[in-house]
Every structure is written in structure tokens, then in C-alpha cells.
């Protein structure tokens, strides 16, 4: 089971990594496997829309079964695909790196992390660091990576 303590560890480790790298202020959302928000933090200076972006990255990862890096790559190859996804998801899919699946020791997806605030690649690195420091496996492209 994915607990609040796990989500808190992920968020705090991700933000610590961001400060160590001197990144822009971040917002971090952690969702359970059903897409429900477990925990969220927004650093001072992060814009108010950052919640929606972070949530959309995590939610989109869960909805598609792969991280938003893969979603970004698919969007570049087939923009119509993203237009359709945006429509059927009510705009909740965000095709930018920073949405990463959280996988437990049994290989099951137990949630996702979405981060927004810096460039997508940096958001993704912080998500991966947070997930791994909490003792889980990060799957930025899906269960096959």
C-alpha cells in the first residue's frame, strides 16, 4: 500500500534534489494508483498553475500506463493523438517530462509523481530521485524501462 509517509518522503527528497541543483521553484504532486491526490507541495515562488501541471503529469502517467517522457515522444510523432487525449481526458494529460510511475517491489504500479516548475527533464530527474529515495522503482517510460 502507498502511504502518506511514502508520498511525503518522495516530495521532500525531490525538493531537496531541486535545491541541490539550484532549479526553479517546483510543485510536486503524488497520486495513488487510482489517480487520487495523496500529497502536494509547492515551493515559494512557484506559480499557481504549477499544481495543475504537476497533477496532470502524474495523472496522465497513470492514465496511459507510462511516464510523460513517453507521452512527449508520442506527441511529437503524432500530434493528433495528443489532441484526442486532451479531449477525452478533460485536458488532464500534460505531455512534458516530469510525470513518472511509482512501482513497488512486486512490480506493481502503486502511483505516480508529477513535478512542474523547471524544464521537463529536470522535473523528471527530481521525480526519479524522490521515488528511489523512498525505496520504490521509478518508471519514467513505463513498466518496461
Image: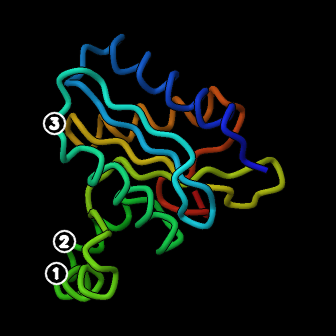
What separation in Å lies between label 1 and label 3 (alpha carbons)?
Answer: 27 Å
Q: Which residue is mark 1?
A: 79
CA neighbours of label 2 inside 10 A, class few (<14), some (14 to 19), many (20+): few
Residue 130: where, in percent of width, then height? 53, 30
Is the residue marked by circle 3 packed among few (<14), some (14-19), or many (20+) residues within 10 Å? Answer: some
Identify the residue under disc 2.
Answer: 76
The one nearer the camera, 122 or 83, is 83
Q: Residue 104 in the image: x percent, y percent?
A: 75, 49
Tell me the element at label 1: helix
Quarter holding residue 122: top left
> Which is nearer the eye, 11 or 121?
11
Q: Quadrant of residue 85?
A: bottom left
Q: Tell me whether circle 2 and circle 1 mark residues in contact (CB < 8 Å).
A: yes
Tell me which label, 3 or 2, sits earlier in the chain: 3
Identify the mark nearer the N-term, 1 or 3.
3
Where is residue 142? Give x, y as percent: 54, 62
For disc 1, the neighbor class at 10 Å (few under 14, some 14 to 19, many from 20) is few
- Label 3 residue SS: loop
- In the rendered view, would you say 81 is above or below 95? below
Amino acid at each position: 500500500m502507498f502511504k502518506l509517509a511514502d508520498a511525503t518522503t518522495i516530495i521532500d527528497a525531490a525538493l531537496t534534489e531541486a535545491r541541490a541543483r539550484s532549479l526553479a521553484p517546483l510543485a510536486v504532486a503524488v497520486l495513488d494508483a487510482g489517480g487520487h491526490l495523496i500529497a502536494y507541495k509547492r515551493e515559494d515562488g512557484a506559480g499557481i498553475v504549477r499544481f495543475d501541471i504537476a497533477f496532470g503529469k502524474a495523472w496522465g502517467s497513470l492514465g496511459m500506463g507510462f511516464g510523460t517522457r513517453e507521452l512527449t515522444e508520442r506527441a511529437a510523432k503524432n500530434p493528433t493523438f495528443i489532441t484526442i487525449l486532451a479531449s477525452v481526458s478533460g485536458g488532464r494529460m500534460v505531455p512534458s517530462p516530469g510525470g513518472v510511475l511509482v512501482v513497488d517491489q512486486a512490480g506493481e504500479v502503486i502511483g505516480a509523481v508529477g513535478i512542474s516548475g523547471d524544464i521537463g527533464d529536470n522535473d523528471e530527474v527530481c521525480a526519479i530521485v524522490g521515488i528511489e529515495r523512498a525505496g520504490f522503482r521509478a518508471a519514467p517510460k513505463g513498466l518496461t524501462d
